[in-house]
Amino acid sequence: MRRIPAALAVIGLSALTLVGCASTPGSAASCDRPADSSGVLNTVSVSGAVGAPDVTLSAPVYVDHTVAVDENVGSGPRVTSDMQDVQFAITIMSGSTGQKILTSGTQVTPLSKWREQYAGFAELMTCATEGSRILGAVPASALSAPAAQGWGLTGADSIVVAIDLQKVYLAAADGTPQYNDRRGMPSVVLAPNGTPGIIIPDTAPPSELAVEVLKKGDGPAVGDGDQIRINYTGVTWADRKVFDSTWDKGASTAVTLDAVVPGFAQALKGQTVGSQILVVIPPTLGYGDKATSSIPAGSTLVFVIDVLGVDTPTAP
């Protein structure tokens, strides 16, 4: 089995964990699956345990566009936006020789980043559900030039791909809106893609931790030890400036409760996946009298947090 060539690794599978520019919804919104009406995948079989698909070709496979069949259909969340994070295991075979090119797991990465370098892979996962096993054929033209070259593909070559879609995260909080009537709290407005805007009132901030659940998700509750996948925007109360935002970076982040400031941890603990939380953190539960490059000392912090999911623990 060949490994990922060094040149490919620079911009290939491993590079797709990097934070990039803001994601925008792609073709996932239409939810059209790239079905195999030609029957070309009838010559391909896939077996093996979940996370380690084993693929066998009984004849060469050549396609001029990406096609797929769902070997198994999962019951988890569906990929409907390029903004969603996904995690999967993949086996790649040469369509011409039937030889294995690569078997690999992947890190949690937005579908938009896959589409940049591996458009065919993004097509295979578009509208698929968590827990699905997807068998597909992808032409070299549906890969970036460095990816195709790194795997020795030219011209009319194709690859056969088996994907176990192990994790699909929410693009944004999708819980039920909640009624809140606490006076003196910031207001939140949402862009169509879920990006929050925070409006600070012309009043003094709360002196104690203040938490409002803006949307209540129906997913599992998060707690100690969880790698919690979130999007967030943070604003300082005094100057009303955004000092950090995963939305601006185009990628979510994973946090544990022991790795964030106490007020953030207290607001997040026990919340359910799919929820959106507004929290005002006094300096004593934030950074106190310590300044950072973007936060003055003694700042009251305001966050809007979307709870997107919980990362699957990595095997030791």
Image (cartoon, rainbow, N blue to C red):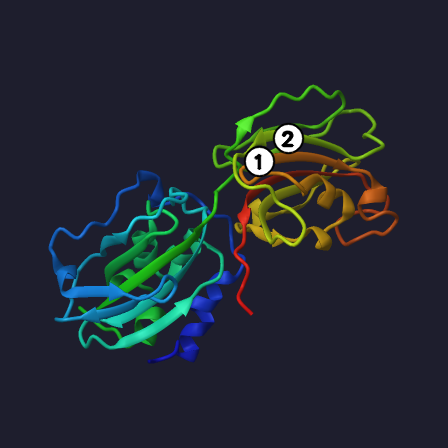
For this orientation, the residue located farthest to the front is 49
Looking at the picture, does residue 42 appear above or below residue 206?
below
Q: Amino acid at mark 1?
A: Ser
Looking at the picture, does residue 8 appear above or below residue 206?
below
Instruction: For mark 1, give the secondary structure.
Output: loop
Horizontal and vertical percent for residue 29?
35, 39
Q: Residues within 10 Å of mark 1 (few under 14, many from 20)?
A: many
Looking at the picture, does residue 87 appear above or below residue 104?
above
Say which residue label 2 marks. Answer: 213
Q: Residue at x 41, y 59 (%)?
A: 88
- Which of disc 2 and disc 1 is earlier in sequence? 2
Say which residue label 1 marks. Answer: 275
Q: Residue at x 69, y 50 (%)?
A: 257
Say whether marks 1 and 2 touch (CB < 8 Å): yes
Q: Would you say 225 lies left or right of 16 here? A: right
**Quarter of the view holding residue 190:** top right
Q: Residue at x 33, y 58 (%)?
A: 121
In this view of the protein, which residue sits in the foreground, 150 or 312? Answer: 312
Q: Residue at x 40, y 73 (%)?
A: 8
Looking at the picture, does residue 108 appear above or below residue 27?
below
